[in-house]
Image (spheres, rainbow, N blue to C red):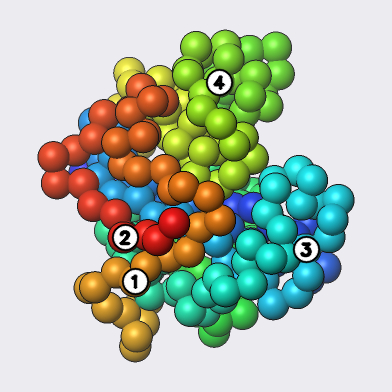
């Protein structure tokens, strides 16, 4: 069975190789019927300042991440959410995977190699669904309702999840073995409260994109 981890990161800049870090991460996991089975989203303390020019894009300020967990702090929840997935999915996946790999490496965890990789940007180009492959353009062309806070991780991940479901709904050639994520010594089955600087998007909110929610879907508890 395929299990798709659709994820998005917001960052301090464009290059993990030059020291830019993740400031927010969101994951929406879909089953092989493209129903949401779990999700996670959290601000992340990047352990460096966020440039004001970048804050103007995604709206995440240095004050907003002041009490957020570091990526290392969040690692148990992230690995738990990624557990069992067969495919990593993102819009322009090389960017998001690059930051994920760099953050994992900084925690002493090697990025698993045994996973399928799907890029909705590439899929949109292949299927010629819009005049360009930008997420906003593809979303509009596919008539996917958008909610506020574009360029926030959970909003982009939710929209990307719906794009994936529409572009792959008749494509059965996506089978892959589950990713073997490393176990982490602090991994816990009890989710922590994850900080947000605005009211969180709930599982039910994802139906706004046209996504169905599985009956056994779960998510961490968050505080506003």
SS assignment at label 3 = loop
Q: Are the two marked residues, 2 and 1, in contact with CB atoms closer than 8 angstroms?
A: yes
Q: Residues within 10 Å of mark 1 (few under 14, many from 20)?
A: some
Front residue of this view, candidates 49 and 144: 49
Disc 2 to disc 1, C-alpha distance: 7 Å
Front residue of this view, candidates 172 and 203: 203
Front residue of this view, candidates 66 and 16: 66
SS assignment at label 1 = loop
Relative placement, left or right, of 55 versus 149 is right
**Residue 103 placement: quadrant:** bottom right
**Residue 205 placement: quadrant:** top left
Q: Which of marks 3 and 2 is nearer the N terminus?
A: 3
Q: Is residue 10 visible?
A: yes
Q: Earlier in the sequence, mark 3 or mark 4?
A: 3
Q: In the rendering, which numbered label is found on residue 192?
A: 1
Disc 3 to disc 4, C-alpha distance: 28 Å
Relative placement, left or right, of 15 versus 174 is right
Task: Give the residue at x 84% y 56%.
Answer: 52
SS assignment at label 2 = loop
204 in relation to 105, above or below: above
182 in relation to 210, above or below: below
Q: How crowded is mark 4: few (under 14 residues within 10 Å), some or many (20 or more)?
A: many
Task: Give the residue at x 52% y 24%.
Answer: 146
Q: Which of marks 3 and 1 is nearer the N terminus?
A: 3
Q: In the rendering, which numbered label is found on residue 139?
A: 4
Task: Give the residue at x 61% y 35%.
Answer: 150
Q: Earlier in the sequence, mark 4 or mark 2?
A: 4
SS assignment at label 4 = helix
């Amino acid at each position: 069975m395929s299990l798709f981890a659709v994820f998005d990161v917001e960052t301090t800049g464009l290059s993990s190789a030059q020291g830019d870090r993740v400031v927010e991460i969101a994951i929406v996991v879909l089953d092989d019927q493209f129903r949401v089975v779990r999700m996670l989203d959290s601000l992340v303390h990047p352990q460096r300042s966020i440039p004001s020019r970048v804050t103007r894009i995604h709206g995440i300020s240095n004050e907003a991440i002041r009490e957020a967990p570091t990526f290392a702090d969040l690692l148990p929840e992230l690995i738990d959410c990624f557990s069992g997935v067969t495919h990593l999915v993102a819009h322009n996946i090389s960017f998001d995977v690059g930051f994920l790999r760099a953050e994992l490496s900084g925690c002493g965890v090697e990025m698993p190699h045994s996973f399928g990789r799907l890029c909705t940007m590439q899929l949109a180009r292949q299927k010629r669904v819009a005049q360009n492959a930008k997420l906003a353009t593809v979303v509009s062309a596919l008539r996917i309702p958008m909610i506020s806070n574009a360029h926030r991780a959970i909003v982009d991940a939710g929209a990307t999840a719906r794009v994936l479901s529409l572009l792959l709904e008749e494509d059965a050639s996506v089978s892959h073995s589950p990713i073997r994520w490393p176990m982490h010594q602090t991994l816990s089955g009890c989710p922590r409260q994850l900080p947000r600087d605005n009211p969180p998007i709930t599982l039910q909110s994802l139906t706004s994109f046209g996504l169905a929610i599985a009956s056994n879907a779960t998510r961490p508890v968050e505080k506003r």
